[in-house]
Image: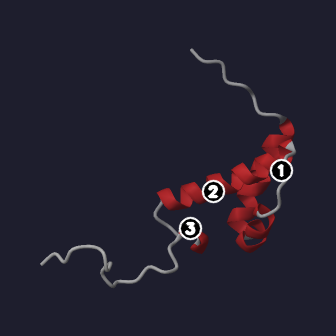
Amino acid sequence: MEHEETPAPEYLKGFNQGYLLAKEKPELMEQLAKVEDKSEQGQGLQDGYKEYLLERIKDKDIIPSKYTDKQKTNEPDKDSPDRD
């Protein structure tokens, strides 16, 4: 059996904040996600945000625009063979 390390209190605080901000204030959290913060709380914030996004994707809810292909169209790819 593997020993799992208990996360630091500051990490947990950041994780919960990141998750809640992603849920309640997604625009603000997207801006905060761009900031590099190597502290325990900063890493928790990033991980909480990622967890929320993963849960939304799993629930087939919304995929944030930064994770979608903005160039995608319904036109067939030029390099792919036609399939009739």
Q: Position of residue 36 (x, y in %)?
A: 82, 56
Residue of label 2: 52
Q: Is residue 24 above or below residue 50?
A: below
Residue of label 3: 67
Q: Is mark 3 on a helix, strand or loop?
A: helix
Foreground pick, 22 / 64 = 64
Q: Residue at x 78, y 71 (%)?
A: 28
Rounded to the nearest angstrom, the CA distance separating label 1 from label 3 is 22 Å
Quadrant the N terminus occupies: top right
Residue of label 1: 42
Q: What is the quadrant of residue 74 in the picture?
A: bottom left
Disc 2: CA contacts within 10 A as few (<14), some (14-19) or many (>=20): some
Mark identifier at residue 56: none
Query: Horizontally, is 26 left or right of 71 in the view?
Result: right
Q: What element carries label 1?
A: helix
Q: Pointer 1 and pointer 3: residues touching (CB < 8 Å)?
A: no
Mark 3 or 2, closer to the camera: 3
Q: Which residue lies furthest to the top in this view?
A: 1
Labels 1 and 2: the sequence-earlier one: 1
Q: Is residue 63 above or below residue 75?
A: above
Q: Position of residue 37 (x, y in %)?
A: 85, 52
Query: Horizontally, is 63 left or right of 8 in the view?
Result: left
Q: What residue type is labelled 3?
A: Tyr
Quadrant the C terminus occupies: bottom left
Mark 1 or 3, closer to the camera: 3
Labels 3 and 2: the sequence-earlier one: 2
Q: Residue at x 84, y 47 (%)?
A: 38
Labels 1 and 3: the sequence-earlier one: 1
Q: Where is residue 75 in the image (x, y as percent from the top left)?
A: 33, 85
